[in-house]
Image (tube, rainbow, N blue to C red):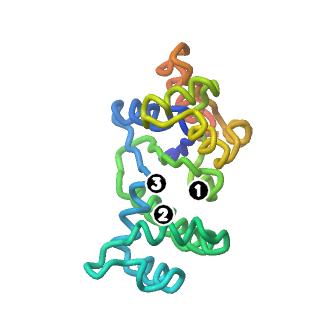
Amino acid sequence: MIKIGITGGIGCGKSYVAAIMAARGIPVYDSDSNAKRLMSSDAGLREKLKSIAGDDVYNSDGSLNRRMLAAYIFADEFGRRKVESAVHPAVKNDFLTWADGICGHELCLFESAILFESGFQDCVDFTVTVDAPLELRIQRCIDRDGVGRETVLQRIASQMSQDEKVRLADYVILNDDVSDLSAQIDGMIDKCRITFKK
């Protein structure tokens, strides 16, 4: 099975492109939602997070105290890295187990906003960055989230630069509301197939 990792900065339309591929019957693994699931359900990961951030990282009913964890991560760079060092390997293993379990599919998609930052590119065969012009990205975020331009720019500045994501990717899909997305997806898949067989 061909495993394709897809990423892109805020407002580029990574999830939109992934949804198009999902509509074609391609299985999509959403790393963000699955990381949240694992932090709640994976016993080993739960114990690691407690040892890193304290028992209060989980509520009395056993659910993840997301606000407390977020505060811990943003308050301490070292703490954030420790949390990531626990969560990211769990997500990688879960993805690979998931991919092994979907026999009969030629390819699958690993969707992650932090594909390169987290090292998730190591568990896929090819990487794709969805790109878009900066002003279009800003307007999409304003329309979608109801936030101001400065807030969007701060969010963009907090991420790995889009130029770097483009540089690191095997393929780039331009989502500028003009270019044909279907044709670009077809071309990317065809190139992956050809390269994978070599």
Using the numbered discs, state the Cα–Cα distance from disc 2 to disc 3 in whole angstroms. Answer: 7 Å
Q: How far across and down, in percent of the image, does residue 53 sit?
A: 51, 80
Left or right: 65 in relation to 195: left
Left or right: 98 in relation to 197: left
Work out whether residue 77 or residue 149 is closer to the camera in this orientation and state it. 149
N-terminal-most mark, 2 or 3:
3
User: Could you tell me which residue is drawn at 47 percent across and 70 percent down?
Assistant: 69
Residue 8 in sight here:
no
Residue under pointer 1:
120
Specify the label residue 91 is tagged with.
2
Residue under pointer 3:
31
Whether residues under marks 2 and 3 lie with C-beta atoms below 8 angstroms apart, the answer is yes
Q: How far across and down, in percent of the image, does residue 11 sit?
A: 53, 34
Whether residues under marks 1 and 3 lie with C-beta atoms below 8 angstroms apart, the answer is yes
Residue at the far top: name it. Answer: 178
- Other-residue count near label 1 (Cα within 10 Å), few / some / many at <14 / 14–19 / ≥20: many
Look at the picture and state if 77 lies above or below 177.
Answer: below
N-terminal-most mark, 1 or 2:
2
Work out whether residue 109 or residue 19 is closer to the camera in this orientation and state it. 19
User: Could you tell me which residue is drawn at 64 percent across and 39 percent down?
Assistant: 198
Identity of the amino acid at label 3?
A: Ser
User: Could you tell me which residue is drawn at 40 percent across and 45 percent down?
Assistant: 28
Left or right: 71 in relation to 41: right
**Residue at disc 2, secondary structure:** helix
Look at the picture and state if 165 lies above or below 12.
Answer: below
In terms of image quadrants, where is residue 145?
top left
Whether residues under marks 1 and 2 lie with C-beta atoms below 8 angstroms apart, the answer is yes
Left or right: 23 in relation to 198: left
